[in-house]
Image (spheres, rainbow, N blue to C red):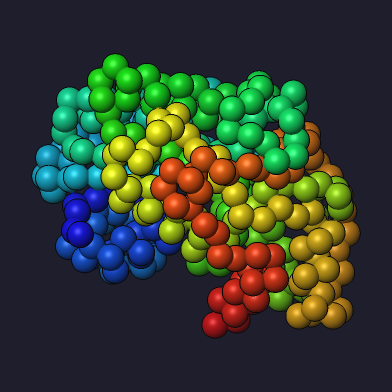
Amino acid sequence: MSRKVLIIGACGQIGTELTKQLRSKYGVSNVIASDIRKMDNEVVNDGIFEVVNALDYNQIEHLIEKYQVDDVYLMAALLSATAEKNPAFAWDLNMNSLFHVLNLAKAKKFKRLFWPSSIAVFGPSTPKDNTPQYTIMEPSTVYGISKQSGERWCEYYHKLYQVDVRSVRYPGLISYTSPPGGGTTDYAVEIFHEALANKSYECFLKADTALPMMYMSDAIRATIRIMEAEPEAIKIRSSYNLAAVSFTPEEISESLTKHIPEFEISYKPDFRQAIADSWPASIDDTHARNDWGWKHEYDLEQITQAMFDGLRA
Ligand code: AKB
């Protein structure tokens, strides 16, 4: 199977890995990576790269037409912690970039849209453990409100205009190639860098804060899998719960200590603690598993091993 794909926000934490995987799957000439600026990295240097502003409808339309794109992956967004510091811009970027691609899909400029949602759609009144697909959703962060609204719009565009939009609610994502930017789950990446550099880490969340997490290669597999599924298999057009593992800072620290016995963690919770406290501790992703065959591979020990292997290499 080969498709022409456009990735908007290709230089971010997910975009970097997604671009690499899609290039190896569909061929370098079929993957158009784009971001707000050109950087000196593999996304820019190893294939087609275009500068694009996710808030510029005409620029996106031009790229879709120029390359005759089949699939668009909209990965540009402001994450939870950064969004709290700049609510107006977060709302503008997270919502209007989505409207642009939904409207371009409605106009039949391309076939399929991937748009990432997040566990941030849930809020303090949501059941915390094994959070179901359908439950109370009262997000209390700007990012969560934008993702929850985005989900409603995705479902609406599918229902009214038959837009083939597909989405998953990513948990915290752990990877070593490209750093996360401005999220609440970022501690689970920073901890590896600090463990190798300084054998210690000051965590901005409390020791017992459990959050749903996933290794990046699992997240990329899920993303490509849902995009390659037959349209009839996609029964949820808002966004699917997606899960792998759940752990606390204390538990990940214990896992790291098996590799670096001198490693020490300390705790200094900041404003991100309130964000984490409003999110689920674990997620029930039965619908994704049943509808399009989702299955994670990495548990905490395997993530730890893979992160150290990757960072040391
Ligand atoms: C964040 O922490 O903001 C993100 C997310 C869970 O969507 N990683």
Residue 170 appears in view: no
Residue at 65% of width from left, 60% of height from top? 189
Q: Quadrant of residue 238?
A: top left
Above/below status of 158 relative to 207: above
In-front residue for pair 137/193: 137
For residue 226, side relative to residue 71 (left or right): right
Residue 180: x and y in percent read 56, 53
Above/below status of 79 relative to 103: below
Above/below status of 219 relative to 96: below
Residue 84: x and y in percent read 64, 31
In-front residue for pair 246/236: 236
For residue 168, side relative to residue 258 (left or right): left
For residue 24, side relative to residue 236 (left or right): left
Q: Quadrant of residue 24?
A: bottom left
Residue at the extreme bottom: 313
Residue 25: x and y in percent read 28, 65
Residue at 61% of width from left, 38% of height from top? 119
For residue 149, side relative to residue 22 (left or right): right
Q: Quadrant of the C terminus?
A: bottom right
Residue at 43% of width from left, 32% of height from top? 236
